[in-house]
Amino acid sequence: MSIRLTLEKNDPVTHDTHHLVFTRPESFEITPGQAVDMTLLREGLRDEARPFTPVAMTDDTLEFVIKSYPDHDGVTKEIPTLRKGEMVEISEPWGAIHDEGAGTFIAGGAGITPFLAILNARLERKGTLEGSKLIFSNKTEEDIICREELEAMTGLETVFTVTDQEDAGVETDLIDRAFLEEHCDPAAGPVYVCGPDKMIEDIVGHLKDMGVPEDQIIIEQFD
Ligand SMILES: Cc1cc2nc3c(=O)[nH]c(=O)nc-3n(C[C@H](O)[C@H](O)[C@H](O)COP(=O)(O)OP(=O)(O)OC[C@H]3O[C@@H](n4cnc5c(N)ncnc54)[C@H](O)[C@@H]3O)c2cc1C
């Protein structure tokens, strides 16, 4: 079944991501971390559904953070041009990532979105994210989505790293085995990983080598 949403706000977050706030339909429910398939009701795009993960939901709103890829000539290229009042269609929620307790969250780029949903919901429920750590990798500091929001989350430890900017004020290493040994404690609860296929594959391999049990590794692929 498809559900129509009306756009209330569309604001830039970084140079290539936007925060979209839609009116939440009355009966719509979603588990934080789940995705929906979204279709823009525009000429030539009505058959082009793409998966996105709401980052927050209130009684009245459903919010997304979406990264645009202008060189793909696809759906996300249109995101910056969506205007208040425009409608989109979404599917029923689906997806594997959900909150399995405090632990380590490892994200690459737009792979932060399910974690924003999970962390926001937990913070609202418990008032603190004590015992959770976020490791967030991007190309440059400019690409870090919702950095201030993440840094302000009570109890959350954050480690940012960038791979294409040597003069950055954050870590500048790839999340490899040595990085994980320094920053990820296998005994600190589940390890959530979300990002591009290759990143997930490499990190899951390192985590297994470090002795993290398979049932403690929770992944969602974004490619
Ligand atoms: C479960 C899930 C949840 C997700 N949630 C979010 C989210 O909340 N926020 C978010 O920003 N993203 C999210 N993503 C990723 C998002 O779905 C993709 O970024 C989006 O589908 C890209 O759509 P697109 O039409 O712009 O490009 P694509 O569908 O990748 O490509 C459109 C066209 O461009 C071509 N193309 C593909 N790659 C390239 C390239 N490198 N260069 C040139 N052309 C290319 C393709 O062949 C195709 O013809 C999620 C993904 C998954 C699987």
Image (cartoon, rainbow, N blue to C red):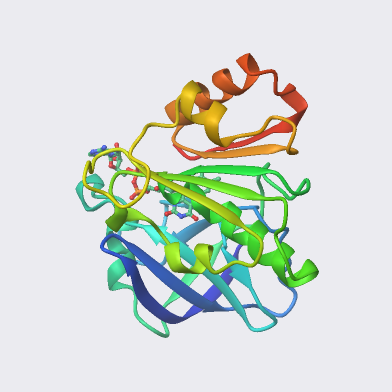
Identify the residue at image location x=42%, y=85%: 85
- Please determine whether, in this image, residue 36 is positioned above or below residue 174: below
Residue 11 falls in image quadrant:
bottom left
Identify the residue at image location x=69%, y=29%: 186
Q: Position of residue 39 (x, y in %)?
A: 46, 59
Q: Would residue 56 be seen by someone viewing this image from the given angle?
A: yes
Q: Nearer the viewer, residue 44 or 124?
A: 124
- Please determine whether, in this image, residue 200 is positioned above or below residue 161: above
Q: Which residue lies most toward the top here?
A: 209
Q: Nearer the viewer, residue 182 or 28?
A: 182
Q: Position of residue 170 (x, y in %)?
A: 36, 49
Q: Would residue 1 be seen by someone viewing this image from the given angle?
A: no
Identify the residue at image location x=61%, y=14%: 209
Q: Position of residue 194 (x, y in %)?
A: 54, 40
Position of the N terminus by quadrant:
bottom right
Identify the residue at image location x=62%, y=78%: 24
**216 horizontally vs 203: left or right:** right
**205 horizontally vs 101: left or right:** left
Q: Nearer the viewer, residue 177 or 72?
A: 177
Residue 144 falls in image quadrant:
bottom left
- Which quadrant does ligand 1 occupy? top left
Position of the C terminus by quadrant:
top left
Q: Position of residue 193 (x, y in %)?
A: 58, 38
**86 horizontally vs 37: left or right:** left
**Count of numbered circles on the image:** 0
**30 horizontally vs 89: left or right:** right
